[in-house]
Amino acid sequence: MSKKSLKLASLICFITCVLLWVPNVLMEVSSPLWILTFVIGPIGLAFGLVGKQYVLAVFNLIMTFSFFWIMALGYYFLGP
């Protein structure tokens, strides 16, 4: 694959991970689709690293562990 297609694939994985959180966070609809971030995030991370797009790789790494970030923010702002 070319660098451009690897960059595009990594970007698509990142955007997909962000969109998977939209029903839960913004619409407050309980959707189990966020679990796919554990699958799509590492794939985007691999595409970013192979394509030497380190910023996209870091974004996909953050989205891989986004469940923990969102839980921490929820407990911090909304309380137990």
Image (tube, rainbow, N blue to C red):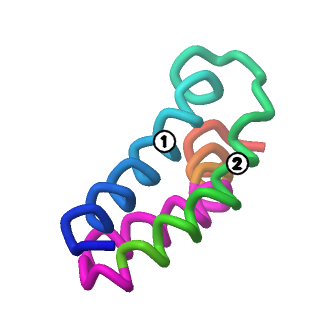
Viewport quadrant of the N terminus: bottom left
Q: Amino acid at mark 1?
A: Thr
**What residue is drawn where x is 77% and y is 22%?**
30
Residue 2, percent from left and from top = 25, 73
Q: Secondary structure at mark 2?
A: helix
Q: Secondary structure at mark 1?
A: helix
| Mark 2 Cα-neighbour bin, 10 Å: few <14, some 14–19, many ≥20 | some
Q: Amino acid at mark 2?
A: Leu
Query: Nearest the camera: 29 or 51?
Result: 51
| Position of residue 53 in the picture relative to residue 66 (left or right) | left
Circle on res. 36:
2
65 in magenta: yes
Query: Nearest the camera: 19 or 6?
Result: 6
Magenta span main SS: helix
From what the image shows, is residue 77 above or below residue 38? Answer: above
In space, the residues marked 1 and 2 are separated at their CA atoms by: 9 Å
Query: Nearest the camera: 4 or 73?
Result: 4
| Position of residue 54 in the picture relative to residue 13 (left or right) | left
**What residue is drawn where x is 66% and y is 55%?**
67
Circle on res. 16:
1
Q: Farthest residue toward the left?
A: 4
| Position of residue 2 in the picture relative to residue 65 (left or right) | left
From what the image shows, is residue 78 above or below residue 12? Answer: above
63 in magenta: yes
| Position of residue 25 in the picture relative to residue 16 (left or right) | right
Magenta part of the protein: which range? Answer: 49-69
**What residue is drawn where x is 59% and y is 50%?**
70
